[in-house]
């Protein structure tokens, strides 16, 4: 929802009703994950996507109909063997899309969600997408670690969904929960889609160099909250790194240690050390590689620099297990030369490690294109 939230909130604030389509379940290969959203504005303009183009026209028509009738709908899109000409996904998978009218009356908690997401505060939105009673689909709860807004229809349902949604929010998971019609566990009849809106992942770039500026742009494109940090104030300026969310003048190891102590580093964080200077990168990597939970740690440099760096890190007491977490030389082998090309190779490696990709051309790989989260 994050990528369409500005347009959606503008429509609702103006008193309008938007048709909002959300991918709630994927089966097999699918171009967009659960949680992908498409918004159809009152004037017919479209923001976002649920399939990358495969079924957008059909979803658009359904969204228009849902706004007209006021009745949400859960629709599956995918080509079956018995209906090869049906509207479906060219990748051969299937998606379940929940389409609903969103306005001030149907989603009064939208402002709360927008404010929390803008402040990078974890928030889960739980929406009934299927129920024997046609009045239930579209009801929702907005759930945080210490508060609940709205109701799904009964205290029993609210309590059950709140407990489960908080667990999903902690894990950063989005998906469908199944209950009995009144929240009974180990029963069927009601489906609730929980969208976990965690703060955007962080990319910490150490080294205020031209490669860092290019990497900051790539990180921003991918949705990272980017920080560039260096101890040299003459180079570490906001003007040099306009794509960064934060530009910090500090010793990198001290800044990283402070961020870890504040709980601001998690399994989605990417740490990229580009300094090329042992007095900066060795202390920083010593901190980074000993963090219990971090998604990616990479360091730039030639193979000679890498060998020297490993020797210095071993002398500093790091174990082989800790050193095995280091991506160095940083990036995939793309033959990159310019800062911009190198930035692409770095984010390509981060993506590959995040999703379990091998970094090989798809023409050389059999099996599914889209990897599941490991």
Image: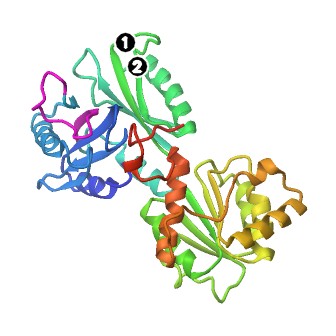
Q: Is residue 335 visible?
A: yes
Circle number at residue 178? 2
> At numbered mark 2, what does the secondary structure look like: helix, strand or loop?
strand
| Residue at horizontal 24 percent and vertical 43 percent from the top | 20
Of residues 119 and 220, which is closer to you in this image? 220
Quadrant of the image for the C terminus? Answer: top right
Majority secondary structure in the magenta region: loop
| Residue most extreme to the front | 364
Q: Which residue is mark 1?
A: 188
| Residue most extreme to the bottom | 234
The x and y percentages for residue 160 are 49, 21
| Residue at horizontal 37 percent and vertical 38 percent from the top | 34
Within 10 Å of the Cα at label 2, are there few (<14), some (14-19), or many (20+) other Cα atoms? some
| Residue at horizontal 18 percent and vertical 46 percent from the top | 17
Distance of label 1 from label 2 (alpha carbons): 6 Å
Is residue 84 placed above or below 333 in the rendered structure?
Answer: above
Q: Is residue 289 magenta?
A: no
Q: Quadrant of residue 102?
A: top left
Tell me: 89 left or right of 296. Answer: left
Question: Do residues under tags 1 and 2 come within 8 Å of each other at their CB atoms?
Answer: yes
Is residue 312 placed above or below 324 in the rendered structure?
Answer: below
The x and y percentages for residue 356 are 52, 44
């Amino acid at each position: 929802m994050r990528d369409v939230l500005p347009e959606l909130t503008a429509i609702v604030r103006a008193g309008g009703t938007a048709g909002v389509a959300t991918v709630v379940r994927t089966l097999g290969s699918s171009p967009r994950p659960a949680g992908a959203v498409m918004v159809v504005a009152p004037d017919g303009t479209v923001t976002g996507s649920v399939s990358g183009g495969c079924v957008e026209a059909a979803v658009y028509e359904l969204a228009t109909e849902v706004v007209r009738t006021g009745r949400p709908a859960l629709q599956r899109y995918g080509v079956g063997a018995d209906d090869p000409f049906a509207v479906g996904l060219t990748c051969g998978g299937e998606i379940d899309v929940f389409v609903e009218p969103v306005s001030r009356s149907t989603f009064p908690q939208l402002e709360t969600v927008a404010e929390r997401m803008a402040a990078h505060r974890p928030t889960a939105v739980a929406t009934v997408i299927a129920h024997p009673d046609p009045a239930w689909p579209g009801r929702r709860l907005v759930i945080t670690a210490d508060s609940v807004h709205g109701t799904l229809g009964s205290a029993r349902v609210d309590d059950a969904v709140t407990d489960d949604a908080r667990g999903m929010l902690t894990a950063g998971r989005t998906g469908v929960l199944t209950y009995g019609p009144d929240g009974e566990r180990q029963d069927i009849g009601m489906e609730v889609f929980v969208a976990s809106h965690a703060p955007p992942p962080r990319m910490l770039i150490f080294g205020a160099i031209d490669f860092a500026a290019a990497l900051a742009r790539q990180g921003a494109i991918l949705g990272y909250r980017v920080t560039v940090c260096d101890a040299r104030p003459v180079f570490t300026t906001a003007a040099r790194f306009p794509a960064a969310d934060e530009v910090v003048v500090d010793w990198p190891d001290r800044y990283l240690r402070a961020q870890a102590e504040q709980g601001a580093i998690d399994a989605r964080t990417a740490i990229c050390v580009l300094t090329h200077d042992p007095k900066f990168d060795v202390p920083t990597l010593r901190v980074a590689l000993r963090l219990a939970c971090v998604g990616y740690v990479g360091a730039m440099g030639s193979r000679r620099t890498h060998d020297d760096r490993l020797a210095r890190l071993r002398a500093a007491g790091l174990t082989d297990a800790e050193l095995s977490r280091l991506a160095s030389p940083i990036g995939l082998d793309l033959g990159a030369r310019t800062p911009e090309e190198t930035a692409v190779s770095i984010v390509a490696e981060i993506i590959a490690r995040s999703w379990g990709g091998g970094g090989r051309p798809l023409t050389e790989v059999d099996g599914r294109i889209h990897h599941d989260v490991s």
